[in-house]
Image (cartoon, rainbow, N blue to C red):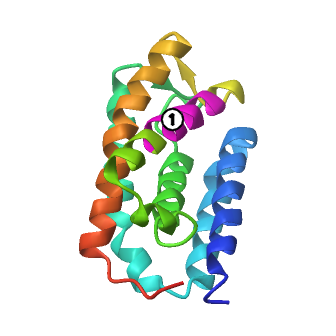
Amino acid sequence: MTKKFWLTNLVLFQLAWFCCALLTANASWLTPLIVALHFLLSPTKRSDAKLLPFAFFGCVVDYILFQLNVINFAEQQFPIWLLCLWVMFVLSVNHSLKWLSNCKLWLISIIGAIGGALSYLGAIKFSAINTSLSLLSLFLVYALIWALLLPALIVFQGKFVELKQN
């Protein structure tokens, strides 16, 4: 299980993302269950737990954008499912996204810019979030944020998280 957990993590993260995108009304109780399942199955619980502060940081970034009315939600408040999605994302850095630690920071920045921004555009297409910006403007905002955020997360993981090899 230890060597193949990256696949379990990938499936759980995708399950969480699609739960948030497609089942938004139920995501606030489903996504905590997915997070709990990850921790139940994870062979690196301590290393995973060390990444949790970064999920809070990601939520703060989204919360600021929510307060600035860049993004908004059907719930009219900042949803718990977004926190859980951030948790699942940062946990992926120890598992299904572990390969990023072998990449150059400039490449991680490009991957973050494109992947991160496209994830938010996908959430808009599924009506999980809304925006007051044009799609291009939203893409550019999140591309800039994720071009900085993903490399920071990878550096944080490399410096502060002691991880068994999966």
- Expressed as whole percent of the image width and height from the top left, the position of residue 65 reads 37, 28
Residue nearest the observer in this picture, 35 or 151? 151
Tell me the residue at 35%/60% (across/down): 154
- Expressed as whole percent of the image width and height from the top left, the position of residue 35 reads 58, 67
Quarter-wise, where is residue 106 in the image?
top left
**In the visual, does 137 lie left or right of 16?**
left
**In the visual, does 53 lie left or right of 117?**
left
Q: Is residue 80 above or below residue 138?
A: below
Quarter-wise, where is residue 25 in the image?
top right
Type of amino acid at the residue the image marks with label 1:
Ile
Residue 66 in view here: no
Local crowd size for mark 1, using a 10 Å CA cut-off: few (<14), some (14–19), many (≥20): some
Q: Quadrant of the N terminus?
A: bottom right
Tell me the residue at 48%/86% (across/down): 165
Tell me the residue at 51%/35% (across/down): 114
Report the residue marked by disc 1. 114
Image mark count: 1
Q: Extreme left residue here?
A: 159
Instruction: Indicate the secondary structure of the residue bearing disc 1.
Output: helix
Provide the major secondary structure of the magenta segment.
helix
As for residue 114 lying within the magenta part, the answer is yes
User: What is the magenta range?
Assistant: 112-123
Q: Is residue 78 above or below residue 5?
A: above
- Expressed as whole percent of the image width and height from the top left, the position of residue 161 reads 31, 77
Residue 114 in view here: yes
